[in-house]
Image (tube, rainbow, N blue to C red):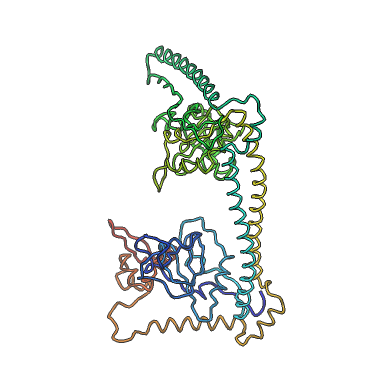
Amino acid sequence: MREDWVECKFEDLLDYEQPTNYIIKEENYSDSLPIPVLTAGKGFIKGYTNEEFGVFDKLPTIIFDDFTTASQYVNFKFKVKSSAMKILNPTSSLVNLKFLFNVMQVCKVRSETHKRYWISEYSQIRFGLPPLPEQRAIVKKIEALFSSLDAGIADLKKAQEQLKIYRQAVLKKAFEGELTKEWREKQTNLPTAEELLVQIEEQRQAYYEKQIEDWKEAVTIWEKNGKEGKKPKKLAKSDLSKNDFIDSEELPNSWKLVQISDILKFLTDYHANGGYETLRDNVELLDEEGYALMIRATNFEKNDFRNDVKFISEQAYNFLSKTKLYGGEILFGKIGNAGKSYLMPHLNRPCSLAMNLFSLTTYINNKYLSYHLKNNRQVQEINSYVKGVGNPTIDKKSIRSIHLSLCSLEEQAQIVKEIEARLSVCDAVEQQIKDSLSQAEALRQSILKKAFEGKLLTEEEIKACQQEPDYEPAAVLLEKIKAEKEANKSSKKIIKGKPKKKMEKKEILQLLAENNNEMLVAQLWKNSVYGEDIDAFYLKLKELAEEGKITEVKNGKKVSIKLI
């Protein structure tokens, strides 16, 4: 740190205000309304309201998420979503708020524990404060560099969106028969979709007859065992839903529009293995390495089947016989991420289906089906079947109803080749974009790090700052800020007119000593110097308890603090 810089803490330069008076009363948001409702996290603007009371207007300011330590610089009037934040205001007119906001972007604390951080930790972070002209120059240079960086990031994100459009264009053409039009014209003896459906019906009949034989054998064993437990259930036969077929003018003549029920072998889920109590008694999820992987939607969302995984024992795996996974199955989210589809990879180890997914096996090419379900037309249809908002769900009947373009198995395989040839290029470009975005974020952090190590400005820029009329060493600046802070505190204590009679605010130990060594918590807080700040009050109680000066006393629902 250079000699004209000084070390300070955030609490030297920032006062906090509780957001209680600015919290939205009703969440009736609309983009046409005038007042933004903010959160300090990634969402930032949650919506807009017409509530004109309790609007924060002491600008600019910083809003600080008290639980995650995320922050936002705000220079417009606003209301807030909740009390989970602090509003940070400068303690003096000499404080450069934008400089402090930039410092906060590199000052991190570990925030895994769910607690409030401003008072206990974040406000105590120390950092180097440069002279005021240098602060302005640093902010100006950061903004110039970030402006160029943000323009590059915007271009990268635009390219990402264009890739999404291209992907959907590829899928649309694929499932309308456009990608394989030339290939199809060269084929001399290509089966039609109708012929494939006849073949599927034959396979389905054979599968049904095999299941009937297995059922008869299971009944015989059940009878030999004295009819213990429930009688094995006979499998119901499922016919092709010919009445549901819809011819589409958009499809080639040899294709057919069908439903998943028409090409379905079986559709199952975790609860097909038994009732709640039976599953509870026979299946235990393990965090440590076990015999089989329990496949969950989060594995697909994170594209990670090695970390954050759950296991089950061999006994549990065999018990869940109806939901063993071998690779190639189509999985559907049934709760939460309802309707989202995944292609089960071949993991070369025992795997079983978790409780919030469906698994379906069909008589057609599984990759063809997987790509088809990501086509916009199918996504929109699936979303129309999803019910609920907070915890959306989809049922088996809806999944069976999803419409598909059906062609011969040979053409399905060719379509998969055509799609993957095009999307593999997309994947490579998208990875390059992701890498570039990561590099841009790393560069942003590097710029900030250099700035607050005093390495961002050139020697010429620093000399220019030293020629500014308000240049002075930061130590002198800090003393002026502290003096103005104290002066502001003193002025707030001056009450105009006739003062209201009220109990003098005192320290906790003094209050307890004057009230027979014990007071109710609410009464103690109200009359203490922390009467306007519940966080600071409980922090002080914790400190005094750790020092062995006070203890908590419970009497039914009443809680009091006693002096030891």
In this picture, is 544 found above or below 208? below
Q: Quadrant of residue 525?
A: bottom left
In this picture, is 296 found above or below 468? above
Which x, y percent locates residue 75? 49, 72
Quadrant containing the N terminus in the rendered view: bottom right
Tell which of 512 and 472 is nearer to you.
472
Q: Quadrant of residue 476?
A: bottom right
Which residue: 64% across, 60% down? 440
Return the residue found at the far right.
Answer: 459
| Number of dots carrying numbers | 0
In this picture, is 16 found above or below 405? below
Tell which of 128 and 530 is nearer to you.
128
Q: Quadrant of residue 149?
A: bottom right
Look at the image and tell me whether residue 95 can be seen: yes
Quadrant containing the C terminus in the rendered view: bottom left
Look at the image and tell me whether residue 474 can be seen: no
Which x, y percent locates residue 563? 35, 67
In this picture, is 502 found above or below 251? below
